[in-house]
Image (cartoon, rainbow, N blue to C red):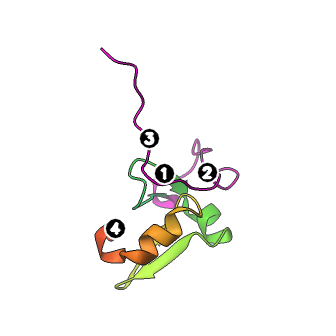
């Protein structure tokens, strides 16, 4: 068995402070980044940092500034309902 860690194919800046502090946060206040699947983010934190995108009538919360350009380049690829 390998201890190899898979990493994302794009590089991005550090996540906003508090992104990983999910303990005690209500489920409806947490979202999964559509670009970095598995990365959870507190919606209010993402909104305060400008890490949100609106597409096709839905709001998407991003985990970091590096995910913005990827989402913007092909929002249909990342948009899920």
The residue wearing badge 4 is 78
Disc 2/disc 1 C-alpha distance (Å):
7 Å
Q: Is the residue 59 above or below the residue 39 in the image?
A: below
Looking at the picture, how far across and down is residue 9, in whole percent? 42, 50
- Is residue 41 found inside the magenta-colored segment of the image? no
The disc, 2 or 1, on the residue closer to the chain's N-terminal end is 2
Q: Are marks 3 and 4 in contact (CB under 8 Å)?
A: no
Magenta span: 1-30
Disc 2/disc 3 C-alpha distance (Å):
18 Å
Looking at the picture, how far across and down is residue 15, in whole percent? 63, 53
Looking at the picture, how far across and down is residue 33, in whole percent? 45, 59
Q: Is residue 23 left or right of residue 79?
A: right
The residue wearing badge 2 is 19
Dot 3, crowdedness within 10 Å: few (<14), some or many (≥20)? Answer: few
Q: Residue at x 67, y 56 (%)?
A: 16
Q: Residue at x 43, y 54 (%)?
A: 36
């Amino acid at each position: 068995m390998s201890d190899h860690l898979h990493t994302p194919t794009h590089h991005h800046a550090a996540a906003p402070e508090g992104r990983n502090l999910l303990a005690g946060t209500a489920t409806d206040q947490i979202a999964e980044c559509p670009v970095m699947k598995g990365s959870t983010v507190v919606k209010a934190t993402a909104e305060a940092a400008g890490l949100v995108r609106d597409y096709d009538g839905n709001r998407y919360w991003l985990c970091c500034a590096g995910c913005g350009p990827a989402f913007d380049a092909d929002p249909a690829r990342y948009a899920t309902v």
